[in-house]
Image: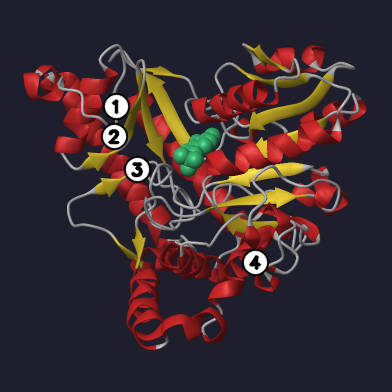
Amino acid sequence: MTTDRHMTRRELAEAQDAQDVLAPMRARFALPQGVIYLDGNSLGPLPHDLRARVTRTLDEEWGQGLIRSWNDAGWIDLPERIGTRIARLIGAPVQSVLAADSTSINLFKLLSAALALRPERRVIVSERGNFPTDLYMAQGLIAQLDRGHRLVLVDDASEIPAALDGDTAVLMLTHVDYRSGAMHDMGALTRLAHEANALVLWDLAHSAGAVPLDLAGADVDFAVGCGYKYLNGGPGAPAFFHVAPRHADAFVQPLAGWFGHDAPFAFEPEYRPAPGAARYLCGTPPILAMAALDAALTLWDDVDIDAVRAKSLALTGAFIDTVEALCPDAGLTLITPRDPARRGSQVSFHHPQAYAVMQALIARGVIGDFRAPDILRFGFTPLYTRFVDVFDAVSVLAEVLETRSYTHPDFQKRARVT
Ligand SMILES: *Cc1c(COP(=O)(O)O)cnc(C)c1O
């Protein structure tokens, strides 16, 4: 692109939008007027295709087809069909990925499998700053097993290599940090864990649909991820899991349900696991939510994930640069890595009044979110975020900080969900 030095920042953003190969994707989402949505990393917006699909599932498949639709409309295959779409996005072998349950529940199942595959070892290594549900599920599993397992937490990623030793059963990490947006080197850390003869479990909640992934190339053992963030499957959408084919037949998961049985409709009294990763299914899938997620994933048929990454880095880079240019000395401290190779698709800042600042931004139509204790978090989702949105959002942020409008008492009240 030619950058005329007389162009204003906003004109430059318009020029970037005019050349954006992903620009047509924006029309496929229902985005409210007057809103700049920078929270698709927490809840993706509604894709138009999803509405039509869910309506069909309701009116035709359920309303008319009734129970016949388990076969006739392919409801029974949805966890696998969705898994196949996600496998392509995350570079995993087909049939190693299925949609099921929530990320938390999938963590429990896979962590349990990992510990069972290393019966002589007692330690799960993770980060103190990992997403709390990941740590809670590990703590709950350890208590349940009651066999002297320990959760060892490091305070900084640089301490991970030294924490891996002959007692490490599994290294459990979130690939892109939900607070800072810092991204781990999946290949290098997986290799290190394997050198210690430990297994890895990656949480891809902030990675799937945000950054290119190569689970097969990195030789990842286990992974989980979220359907309602960058995959736009809707609030509480089903999650997904990945089990490497070499482990898939090796262990019976703890939540042995009939959907993971080899022959659910034989109604046998004894559990016999299905071959492969399908044994990690549990009970009847929520079909309306599965249909919604499946429809949302069709958007990725028309998208090159490398183009998504290129635009994501351009958006996050532009946001950082524009904040630094328009909001100097405003009390903001960048906590996201400046090195593009080390960040996911979000930008976060510390601010002493982060909660109130975010409420003031939301009141002005710029929706990001707040993460305790003092983080302003902005997600950049290349399928529908424009470069002008970056500029306009920063302009509003600059004004909120300059006028101190965030000090209004309305912006101090904490809601249940932040
Ligand atoms: C969002 C998120 C989750 C969410 O788990 P749920 O079971 O869907 O509530 C888990 N892990 C990470 C890292 C997340 O960011």
Q: Which residue is located at x 41 percent, y 67 percent?
A: 288
N-terminal label among 1 and 3 = 3
Given residues 231 and 331, the one toward you in this image is 231
Q: Nearer the viewer, mark 1 or mark 3?
A: 3
Q: CA distance from mark 2 to mark 1?
A: 7 Å
Q: CA distance from mark 4 to mark 1?
A: 48 Å
Q: Is residue 291 above or below residue 148?
A: below
Task: From the top left corner, tell me how far across and down residue 60 is, in percent.
Answer: 37, 86
Q: Nearer the viewer, mark 4 or mark 2?
A: 4
Find disc 2 in the rendering and name its residue.
394
Q: Which residue is located at x 68 percent, y 43 percent?
A: 223
Q: Amino acid at mark 1?
A: Leu
Q: CA distance from mark 3 to mark 2?
A: 11 Å
Tag 2 secondary structure = helix
- Label disc, if present, on residue 38 of the rendered structure: 3
Q: Residues within 10 Å of mark 3 (few under 14, many from 20)?
A: many
Q: Nearer the viewer, mark 3 or mark 4?
A: 4
Residue 233 appears left or right of 113? left
Q: Amino acid at mark 2?
A: Val
Find disc 1 in the rendering and name its residue.
326
Q: Which residue is located at x 80 percent, y 19 percent?
A: 122
CB of residue at label 4: within 8 Å of ligand 1?
no
Q: CA distance from mark 1 to mark 3?
A: 18 Å
Please say whether residue 317 is visible from this viewpoint: no
CB of residue at label 3: within 8 Å of ligand 1?
no
